Amino acid sequence: MSITTGATECTVVAFGCNDDGQLGTGAKRRPTLAIDDVSASNFPQQLGGLLTEEIVAVSCGSRHTMALTVNGVVYSWGWGSMGQLGHGDLKSINEPQKIAFFEQEGLVIDYISCGGCHSAAVANDGTLYMWGETHWGQLGLPKEFEAAHESLPVKCPMPEGEPGEKIVKISCGGTHTAALTNHGRVYVWGRGDSGQLGIGSAWLKDTDDEGLLGVSRPHPLDGFNGEKVVQVACGAFHSAAVTEQGHVYIWGKEDYGMLGVGQTSDQQTPKRVEFFNEIPALRVSCGGWHTVVVAKSGDCYAFGRGEYGRLGLGDTKSRTRPHLVKALKGQMVIQAACGGSHTLFVTSDGIAYVAGRPECVANV
C-alpha cells in the first residue's frame, strides 16, 4: 500500500504489526515474550528517524517499508532477508535507513513502491531500479541475474518506447510488478499464473526460464481500448488501472469478488468495470483480497473480501460488485490504500480513516 502527500508539512506515523521492525520506531522484540505481546502498535507512533526530513510518499510492503523525501532521497526499514531494503545486505532493521546507493550514483528518485518481498524506485530521468526477491521474475532483470535476491538496486532494462517516453510510476504486487509511462502505456512482469499480468497465455511463451510461472522481462500490456492509462495498481494476486477517461480496468485472480465484475473465474486480460462508466474514477488500490476505487466526485467504492470489515461497509460481508462506502459520504476522499486485511482512506482536509483487522488499524 502506498500514500503520497501534498506540499504541506508532513510527519510520518506508523501503527500495526511490527514483527520485523516495519514500523520503523526502533522498538525491539523481547525474545522472552510471545510475539503478540510486543510486536504491534495500536496507536500511531511518530518515526523519530524521519523528523528532519520532508516526506512526500510512503509505501508499505508485506513486511518492509520505504519513504521518499521531497529531495528524492529514499529510506527503507523492516524485514530485509530478501534484500528488499536495498542496503547491500540481508539484514532487517527497525529504524529508517537511507538507501545510500542512489546518492552514490547521483540519482534523484521520483516514485517508490514496496511489494511482497521486492522494491522499486523510478529516478527523475525515468530510469527504473529494482531489488529484492527474484524468484518469480518480479524484478524484470536479464537472465544473467541468477541470484535468489538482489540486495542493491539494479537498473531494470525496459523495451524501447516512443521518443520522449519514460517510466513515471511503478507498482509492486505480491510477486509481480507493473510500470506506467508518461505516454500512458503499461508494462508488466513477474508471476502470472493467476492472470495478474493481464497478458493472457503470453506468459507461457515469453519466458526463457524453465518452470517460471510468469514473465521475467517487462512485457507491454494492451487491452485498454486505446485509452491512456494514468494509474496502475498491483495487489497480491490481481491488478487494476485507471484511464484518463476515468474508466477502471481490472484483471487477475478472482476470489471473494475482488475484481468487482461479478464473475467467479480468474480474469486473464484487462476487463472494464462497467460500474465506473458513469462514475469516473480518480484512482484505484488493490489489496490482498479486496479493491477500493476513489471516484473523481470524492466518493469511495469497495469490493472483494469483507472479513475484518476491511471494506469499510459496516459489516464483514464480501461484495462482488462495487459498493459505496457510506460512512465517508460527504467527505472528499482523495486517496485509499489497501493492505492485506485493512484499508486506509485519506480526505482532502488531511483526515485519515481506517477499516479492517484490529491488529492493523489504530485510532488515527
Image (cartoon, rainbow, N blue to C red):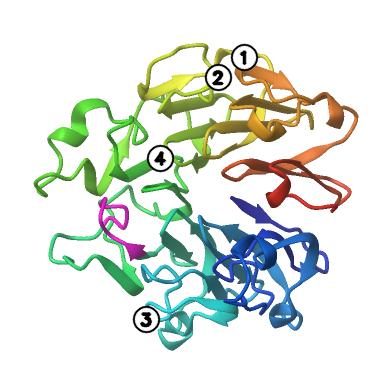
Earlier in the chain: of badge 2 and badge 4, it is 4
Q: Which callout, 2 or 4, points to the residue nearer the camera? A: 2
Q: Which residue is mark 1?
A: 275
Q: Crowdedness of circle 3 by 10 Å Cα count: few (<14), some, many (20+)?
A: some
Tag 4, which secondary structure? loop
The picture places residue 354, in percent across and down from the top left corner, at 77, 44
Q: Are marks 3 and 2 in contact (CB under 8 Å)?
A: no
Would you say the magenta stretch is mainly helix, strand or loop? loop
For the residue labelled by badge 2, is the local secondary structure a helix, a strand or a loop?
A: loop
Q: CA distance from mark 4 to mark 1?
A: 23 Å
Q: CA distance from mark 1 to mark 3?
A: 46 Å
**Amino acid type for the residue under numbered disc 2:** Gly
Q: Residues within 10 Å of mark 2 (few under 14, many from 20)?
A: many
Q: Which numbered tag is attached to residue 89?
A: 3
Is 1 situated left or right of 136 in this image? Answer: right
Q: CA distance from mark 1 to mark 2?
A: 9 Å
Residue identified by numbered label 4: 185
Quadrant of the image occupied by residue 135: bottom left
Q: Nearer the viewer, mark 4 or mark 3?
A: 3
Q: Which residue is drawn at the image coordinates 76% and 80% (left, top)?
A: 51
Is the residue under label 2 in contact with that under label 1 (CB below 8 Å)? yes
- Report the span colored magenta: 132-140
Q: Which residue is mark 2?
A: 260
Residue 211 drawn at (x, y percent) = 13, 44
Task: Look at 64% across and 60% down and name the residue there.
Answer: 36
Q: Amino acid at mark 3?
A: Asp
Q: Residue at x 44, y 43 (%)?
A: 183
- Find out whether residue 99 is within the magenta segment: no
- For label 3, the SS is loop
Q: Earlier in the sequence, mark 3 or mark 2?
A: 3
